Image: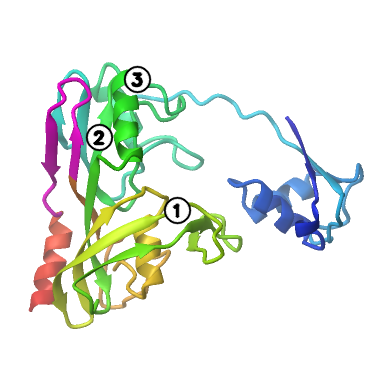
Amino acid sequence: MKKELKVNLENKNKRLDIFLSEQLEKTTRSQIKNFIEKDLVLLNGKLPQKAGVLVKENDIVSLEQEEPKPLELQAENLPLDIVYEDEYLAVINKAQGMVVHPAAGNFSGTLVNALLYHFKSLSNLNTNLRPGIVHRLDKDTSGLIVIAKNNEVHQSLARQIKEKSAKRVYRAIVSGVIKEDNGIINKNLIRSTKDRKQITVTSDGKGRKAITEYKVLERFPNFTYAEFNLKTGRTHQIRVHCKYIGHPVVGDVTYGYHYKNIRLKGQLLHAYKLEFVHPITNIKMEFIAPLPEYFEKMLKKLSK
């Protein structure tokens, strides 16, 4: 599979590896460097001398990539906390540490592997690697996620999320004391050019619209227990917005602080409430997932 990219005026004088990593969203600079070392990258039809060579306007960068082999998903008998299930959909209380769908480095042990074992039918609109998945949660975020068993239900649920008629409420413990009782964070998000695995706030109008409402539930010395209502559903949205206002989620190793005296396996962020209209019965449904035990323990520790 060959890909050709033309360098425009905006990208001239950038390093070749940086240019490619920015153009290829899901490819890291280390992967780009590996492609260059394997002679899979050409600059104007010739092998570049090094990854750091500067590209010029109208240069043609070619990348030869091997066709990925189709991944066969395996059903796995993994424990699932099924909050609700009928013939059309299911609501799962996902545990912290479980990846939602298979991807590079995580081909087993995911929520999808478990779904394939527990349910006979799942929607297939969201690529063949994400059967049933209408929306997602980060690996170390616990809580509620809805699963579609057919495409009609999937389309309805996805539309409700897009149109904001579905409601997703999260709870988190964040660093520092939030002064306002409530507020709205309205800042676009974009993938970081420094680290493609991270998301960052942008102030130049670029990126994707992201809106998070928050409400303080309880304040502690140096920490705040808060509730977040998603108005949009971007990757890492709550975590990045919390970092932006100076109150990163406790336990977030990517966007937060490291506390020597706090030992956690991931961020204290929990998808607490989920509301939507059932696509078939038209009945409004509301689900609440109690806080995980480790989350409750932290609240008790802070209250002392």
Numbered tag placed on residue 254 in the rendering: none
Amino acid type, mark 2: Val
Amino acid type, mark 1: Lys
Instruction: First in sequence, mark 3 or 2: give its number.
Output: 2
**Vertically, is 92 above or below 240?**
above
Q: Name the residue under label 2.
A: 146
Cα separation, mark 1 vs mark 2, equals 23 Å
Cα separation, mark 3 vs mark 2, equals 13 Å
Residue 290 lies within the magenta run: yes
Towards the viewer: 289 or 281: 281
Label 1 element class: loop
Q: Name the residue under label 3.
A: 151
Towards the viewer: 69 or 236: 236
**Vertically, is 244 above or below 296?**
below
Position of the C terminus, as image quadrant, is bottom left
| Residue 115 place in picture, x, y as percent | 29, 28
Instruction: First in sequence, mark 1 or 3: give its number.
Output: 3
* Number of numbered discs visible in the structure rendering: 3
Compared across the picture, whether 119 is left or right of 23 comes to left
Residue 205 lies within the magenta run: no
Asked if the residue at tag 2 contacts the one at tag 3, i.e. Cβ–Cβ closer than 8 Å, the answer is no
